[in-house]
Image (tube, rainbow, N blue to C red):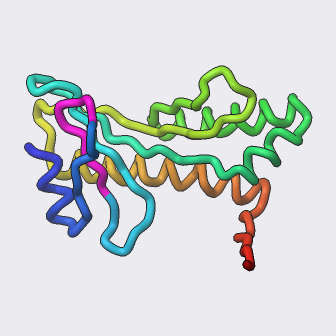
């Protein structure tokens, strides 16, 4: 079963990521824009696909997180990790040992053997919902950053 066919049948934009080092690395997004997923197959003979979403943390949210007392900051990030793990989602922060992440990567591995369209759909929604949870947790805690305008 080819997961790419599932994404295309849903009318999603599917495009190759330029200069990717993996055998297959695709960016998947809705036609009208929105959160982007990435599908990776490390090697041609690999039986594993990784479907992930990289959530960049806005500078405003980074500064707000950094301004928290260390115990509150740790509690916020730990709560996020555990909520994602309960969703059966892998999670990684970049940079990994920094107090304030610049990026949160959520992902799920799919095995090629016996993979069904329903499996692909379930993983897609799980990963997308996990990424949305990250966005909402920052927005709910710190508010939505206001756009700035510059005049000449």
Viewer-proximal residue among 19 and 103: 19
Residue 135, percent across and down?
Answer: 60, 54
Instruction: Say if the magenta span includes residue 117.
Output: no
Please report the bounds of the magenta region as a residue range. Answer: 20-28
Viewer-proximal residue among 113 and 106: 106
Q: How many marks?
A: 0
54 vs 35: above or below: above
In the picture as drawn, the residue positioned furthest to the front comes out as 152
Q: Is residue 14 left or right of residue 112?
A: right
Q: Quadrant of the N terminus?
A: top left
62 vs 139: above or below: above
- At a point 15% along the width and 39% down the height, the residue shown is 115
- At a point 25% along the width and 64% down the height, the residue shown is 12
In the picture as drawn, the residue positioned furthest to the top comes out as 97
- At a point 38% along the width and 41% down the height, the residue shown is 52
Q: Residue 143, located in which quarter of the rendered image?
A: bottom right
- At a point 69% along the width and 37% down the height, the residue shown is 79
Residue 62, percent across and down?
Answer: 74, 45
102 vs 12: above or below: above
Residue 152, percent across and down?
Answer: 73, 78
Viewer-proximal residue among 58 and 73: 58
Residue 142, percent across and down?
Answer: 79, 56
In the picture as drawn, the residue positioned furthest to the bottom comes out as 151
């Amino acid at each position: 079963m080819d997961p790419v066919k599932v994404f295309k049948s849903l009318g999603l934009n599917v495009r190759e990521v330029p200069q990717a080092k993996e055998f297959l690395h695709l960016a998947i997004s809705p036609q009208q824009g929105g959160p982007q997923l990435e599908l990776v197959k490390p090697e041609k003979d690999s039986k594993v696909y990784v479907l992930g979403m990289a959530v960049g943390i806005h500078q405003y949210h980074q500064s707000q997180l950094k301004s928290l007392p260390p115990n509150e900051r740790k509690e916020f990030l730990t709560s996020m990790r555990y909520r994602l793990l309960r969703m059966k989602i892998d999670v990684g922060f970049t940079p990994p040992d920094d107090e304030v992440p610049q990026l949160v990567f959520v992902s799920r591995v799919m095995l090629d053997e016996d993979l069904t369209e329903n499996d692909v759909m379930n993983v897609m929604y799980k990963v997308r919902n996990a990424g949305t949870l990250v966005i909402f947790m920052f927005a709910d805690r710190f508010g939505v950053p206001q756009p700035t305008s510059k005049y000449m």
